[in-house]
Image (spheres, helix red, strand yellow):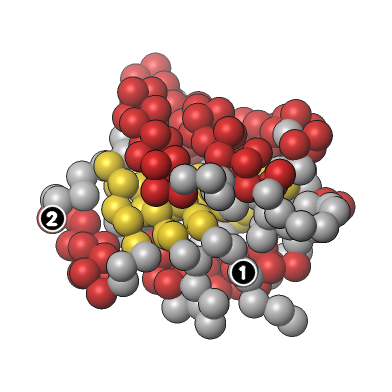
Amino acid sequence: MGELRVRSALVTGANRGIGLGFVRHLLALPNPPEWVFAGCRDPKGQRAQELQKLASKHPNLVIVPLEVTDPASIKAAAASVGERLKCSGLNLLINNAGILKANTLDTETLKDMSEVYTTNTIAPLLLSQAFLPLLKKAAQGSLGSGMSCSKAAIINISSIGGSISSLTGWDIMEIVSYRCSKAALNMLTRCQSMGYREHGILCVTFHPGWVQTDMGSAAGLPPPLTVDASVGGMLKVLSKLSEKDSGTFLDWEGNVVAW
């Protein structure tokens, strides 16, 4: 099985958890990207220290200031990345940034639901719109036919919590706003797969597993999956994706997840 090969990748929410894992694994590939862009709300803050250490060791890692709920910040990030890439375009956009509010059906609020939906669903839409010209440029500049992550792809990090048919873990955490936002993100991915097919951009949504992160531990139970196992698995799956997979909902092992 071949390793993932991309010239450039951008990861949102890259200062910790799964996002930081993606950055580490991309940099450690046998053929690492020429550019890895790490989107982070506060690049110089306490929570970005691990990212800063990585950037000091890897000249191909660029930390990009990015508040995913702010259209002006998204626009500035797209311009900054475009300047670095010059004429080559962006191969891989990983919309990873997300938040969770541990509310029940009875305690959910307008404020919390709006905030979660804005971060988890609207932000991936706006980011994909902003980086579309760079993704199209990458797809057009790639040799061969068909779709792949080596050409141009949007990867939306979702959750089995957004599966309408399973409602996994309801007895542990209701997290209504989170579930609704991820179900909507899954539909967004389907829409993107239809709308961007003509441009040769592959669009997939992932359930990364129940991972040992701050968010994953919010239920008070120990998650079974390490960040390395989750991210390593997803990158292996990404290396094999083709146009037949565009618009699908997969887990970190490549299994299809029920909508």
Element type at mark 2: helix
The answer to which of 160 and 187 lies nearer the viewer is 187
For label 1, count other residues whose C-alpha is less than 10 Å away and answer few (under 14), some (14-19) or many (20+): some
Q: Where, quadrant-wise, is the N terminus in this rendering?
A: bottom right
Query: Type of residue at label 2?
Result: Gln
Q: Which residue corresponds to the image point at 35% horizontal and 39% vertical from the top-left?
A: 80
Element type at mark 1: loop
- Earlier in the chain: of badge 2 and badge 1, it is 1
Toward which corner of the image does residue 162 lie, by quadrant?
A: top right
The answer to whether 210 is drawn above or below residue 158 in the figure is below
Q: Which residue corresponds to the image point at 78% horizontal and 47% vertical from the top-left?
A: 246
The answer to which of 87 and 237 lies nearer the viewer is 87
Res 68 visible = no
Q: Which residue corresponds to the image point at 46% horizontal and 49% vertical from the top-left?
A: 85
For label 2, count other residues whose C-alpha is less than 10 Å away and answer few (under 14), some (14-19) or many (20+): few
- As drawn, the residue found furthest toward the top would be 110
From the viewer's perspective, is 19 left or right of 194? left
Q: Which mark is residue 46?
A: 2
Horizontal and vertical percent for residue 180?
A: 56, 32
Q: Which residue corresponds to the image point at 36% horizontal and 54% vertical from the top-left?
A: 38
Horizontal and vertical percent for residue 212?
A: 41, 67
Res 147 visible = yes
Give the number of the mark in front: 2 or 1.
1
The answer to whether 52 is drawn above or below residue 92 in the figure is below
Toward which corner of the image does residue 217 lie, by quadrant?
A: bottom left
Query: Type of residue at label 1?
Result: Arg
Horizontal and vertical percent for residue 168?
A: 62, 51
Q: Which mark is residue 5?
A: 1
